[in-house]
Image (cartoon, rainbow, N blue to C red):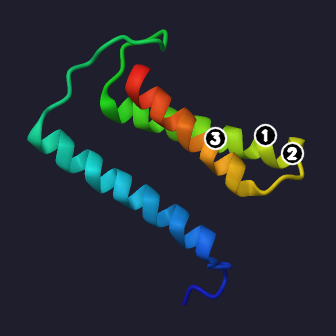
Amino acid sequence: MLSWMAWTAPVAIFFACIAAMLIGMTIWELRSPTVPRKGLLPLVTTRGDRLFIGLLLAAYINLAWTGATDLTQWWGAMLGAVGLVCVMRWG
């Protein structure tokens, strides 16, 4: 059924992390509704907005890492994760 995609361990880990983030954010939102705020980003955002922006940032960091360096992608993934955490915390 899923033979059309190369389900390698890194791909499975990636999708599992995204699913865990979405589940965690849903539980967090149900327990403590978000309050829109303005941080370092030039717009008022909620936690969900910051998660989406952070995921986009992580994707662009990974694409730039892939295009600009021959180093292992794990370093790009870690840098993207740091960017995501920064946007979630201070964005």
From what the image shows, is residue 22 above or below residue 2? above
Labels 1 and 3: the sequence-earlier one:
1
Question: Image quadrant for the C terminus?
Answer: top left
Q: Amino acid at mark 1?
A: Ala
Total numbered labels: 3
Q: CA distance from mark 1 to mark 3?
A: 11 Å
Q: Residue at x 60, y 69 (%)?
A: 11
Q: Amino acid at mark 3?
A: Leu
The mark found on residue 34 in the picture is none
From what the image shows, is residue 11 above or below residue 76? below
Labels 3 and 2: the sequence-earlier one:
2
Name the one closer to the observer, 88 or 47: 88
Residue 80 percent location from the top left of the image: 61, 41
Q: Residue at x 46, y 35 (%)?
A: 85
Q: Residue at x 84, y 52 (%)?
A: 71
Pointers 1 and 2 in contact (C-beta within 8 Å): yes
Q: CA distance from mark 1 to mark 2?
A: 5 Å
Disc 1 is placed on an element classified as helix
The mark found on residue 79 in the picture is 3
Decide: few, some or many residues near mark 1? Use Cα within 10 Å; few <14, some 14-19, many ≥20: few
Residue 66 percent location from the top left of the image: 81, 49
Toward which corner of the image does residue 4 lie, by quadrant? bottom right
Q: Which residue is mark 2?
A: 67
The mark found on residue 64 in the picture is 1
Decide: few, some or many residues near mark 3? Use Cα within 10 Å; few <14, some 14-19, many ≥20: some
Toward which corner of the image does residue 33 lie, by quadrant? top left
